[in-house]
Image: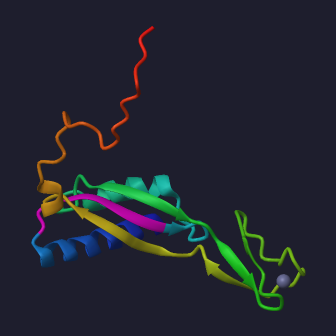
Amino acid sequence: MHEMSLAVAVVDQVETAAQSRGAVGVSSIVLDVGELAGVVPDALAFCFELACAGTVVEGAELITRTVRGTARCAPCAGDWEVGMPPRLLCPGCGAAAAELVSGRELRIREVRWADSEAGAGRRADPEAPREEHRHPITEES
Ligand SMILES: [Zn+2]
């Protein structure tokens, strides 16, 4: 199962990083997943739950971001989104000499540690006013 081995690899990498920085928890992991990588996000989320059980990663939120597949044409240098199923003929000149530029990536983009100093601040007070001070001039008529 492709997603299972991917999930295990992600958990392994984050665990290693957590050990080296002495983190005790992970709040979320952002993963870039190319649309041509053959990963089913729901299956990945399910496997991730299994893979992180009992590790420091347990309870972390997995956020997957889809990276669009793009290809570039060698003869005319045009590029386009290949879509799903992938269209590999150049829409400009019809050449089949496309080179995939993106869409197959599988990488950890960001890890938010549960115990990081930034997250431990008291600024996340739910009672705190919002950043946006939108106090419209209330005209009670
Ligand atoms: Zn072309």
Q: Which residues are magenta?
A: 23-32
Q: Position of residue 120 (x, y in %)?
A: 12, 55
The residue lying toward the viewer, choosing from 20 and 4, is 20
Quick one: which residue is furthest to the bottom in this view? Answer: 75
Magenta stretch: helix, strand or loop mostly:
strand
Residue 76, picture quadrant: bottom right
Where 68 falls versus 100 (above or below)? above
The residue lying toward the viewer, choosing from 47 and 37, is 37
Q: Position of residue 33 (x, y in %)?
A: 50, 67
Marker count (numbered): 0
Quadrant of the image containing the C terminus: top left
Q: Is residue 60 magenta?
A: no
Residue 58 appears left or right of 36: left
Quick one: which residue is furthest to the top in this view? Answer: 141
Q: Position of residue 91 (x, y in %)?
A: 85, 74
Report the residue at 12% width, 62% height from top.
117
